[in-house]
């Protein structure tokens, strides 16, 4: 059975958990590993920002009983868009910000839109995203160590990882964890690309907004690297990771500083 058939089966079960206002939500488990086992389900989930949920969404969200939520947004991204319905007595919410520019400046969404307005004809958004993926993997190692350690220490309770759209920062972290569990790289890539199908409506809304905001000076082709995930973004970052460290385990220990005992415990908890 190839990766597409496997994902079709897994995604059929995932569809039963869809929310009205929580986009790109899914369990990152349920995928086969190279040693014939399966990555556990019900343990690690991913999504976009859970701040604008309906009443039924909130009820369903709370039934999942998340013990830990790792929020990868920056402080400026979070400030007006917090999930205030979460009971922090039972759910630990940890902000582990991944900054979206090379200088770790905490730009607001409005500032990003103004950048598009000023430099609509010159900014290379494809190259910007290629560099961002490299930055996350090789310059945000402290954040990755924090996330892996937090997830390992949460033991068998459900955890959620999210950023703003749940596709790039969240997608990279999910891919690293799936690779650590032993999921084949082509299956990890197919799961990563699933964000485009799950984000379709949101992507179209953002595209129309950006087009109006920039007075129609940005074409669809130029802006889509910001709004969709692309195979090359993750592929190039992983190619460089394996070139430098040979394995995800080596990368997490040597580059990110994850404790070896913690990593082995976390890896063992990911599969059945």
Image: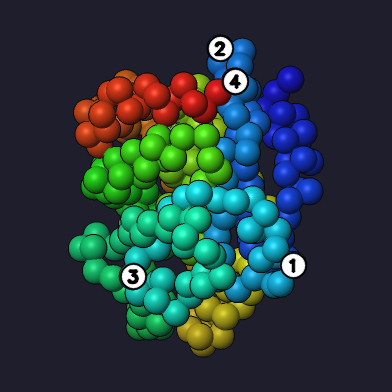
- Residues marked 3 and 4 touching at CB (< 8 Å): no
For label 2, count other residues whose C-alpha is less than 10 Å away and answer few (under 14), some (14-19) or many (20+): few
**Which numbered disc, 3 or 2, marks the residue that appears first in the sequence?**
2
Foreground tag (2 vs 4): 4
Number of marks in the image?
A: 4
Dot 4: within a 10 Å radius of its alpha carbon, few (fewer than 14), some, or many (20 or more) residues? few
Residue at x 28% of width, y 70% of height: 106
Front-most of residues 31 and 127: 31
On screen, residue 183 versus residue 121, left or right, reads right
Residue named by callout 4? 272
Q: Is residue 192 visible?
A: no
**Can you identify the residue that label 1 sits on?**
56
Kindly identify which residue carries mark 2.
Answer: 35
Q: Residue 181: where, in percent of width, then height?
A: 49, 25
The vertical placement of 16 against 111, above or below, is above
Q: Residues within 10 Å of mark 3 (few under 14, many from 20)?
A: some
Q: Is residue 57 left or right of residue 258?
A: right
Which color scheme does this rendered protein use? rainbow
Q: CA distance from mark 2 to mark 4?
A: 11 Å
Choose the circle earlier in sequence order: 1 or 4: 1
Question: Where's the N terminus, which quadrant?
Answer: top right
Observer-nearest of 113 and 106? 106
* Closer-to-camera residue (74/221): 74
Q: Earlier in the sequence, mark 1 or mark 3?
A: 1
Residue 75's tag is 3
């Amino acid at each position: 059975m190839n990766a597409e058939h496997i994902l079709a089966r897994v995604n059929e079960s995932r569809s039963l958990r869809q929310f009205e206002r929580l986009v790109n939500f899914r369990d990152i488990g349920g995928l086969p590993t190279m040693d014939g086992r399966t990555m556990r389900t019900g343990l690690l989930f991913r999504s976009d920002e859970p701040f604008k949920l309906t009443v039924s969404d909130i009820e369903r969200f709370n039934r999942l009983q998340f013990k830990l939520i790792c929020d990868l947004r920056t402080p400026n991204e979070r400030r007006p868009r917090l999930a205030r319905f979460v009971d922090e007595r039972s759910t630990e919410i940890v902000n582990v910000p991944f900054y979206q520019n090379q200088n770790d400046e905490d730009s607001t969404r409005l500032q990003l839109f103004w950048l598009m307005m000023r430099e609509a004809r010159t900014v290379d958004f494809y190259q910007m995203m290629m560099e961002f993926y490299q930055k996350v993997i090789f310059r945000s190692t402290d954040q990755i160590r924090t996330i892996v350690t937090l997830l390992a220490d949460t033991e068998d309770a459900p955890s959620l990882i999210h950023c703003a759209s749940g596709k790039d920062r969240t997608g990279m972290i999910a891919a690293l964890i799936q690779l650590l569990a032993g999921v084949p790289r082509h299956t990890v890539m197919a799961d990563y690309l699933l964000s485009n199908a799950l984000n379709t409506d949101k992507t179209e809304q953002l595209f129309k907004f950006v087009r109006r905001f920039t007075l129609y000076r940005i074409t669809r082709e130029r802006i889509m690297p910001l709004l969709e995930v692309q195979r090359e973004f993750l592929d190039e970052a992983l190619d460089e990771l394996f070139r430098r460290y040979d394995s995800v385990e080596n990368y997490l220990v040597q580059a990110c500083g994850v404790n070896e005992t913690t990593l082995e415990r976390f890896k063992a908890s990911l599969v059945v």
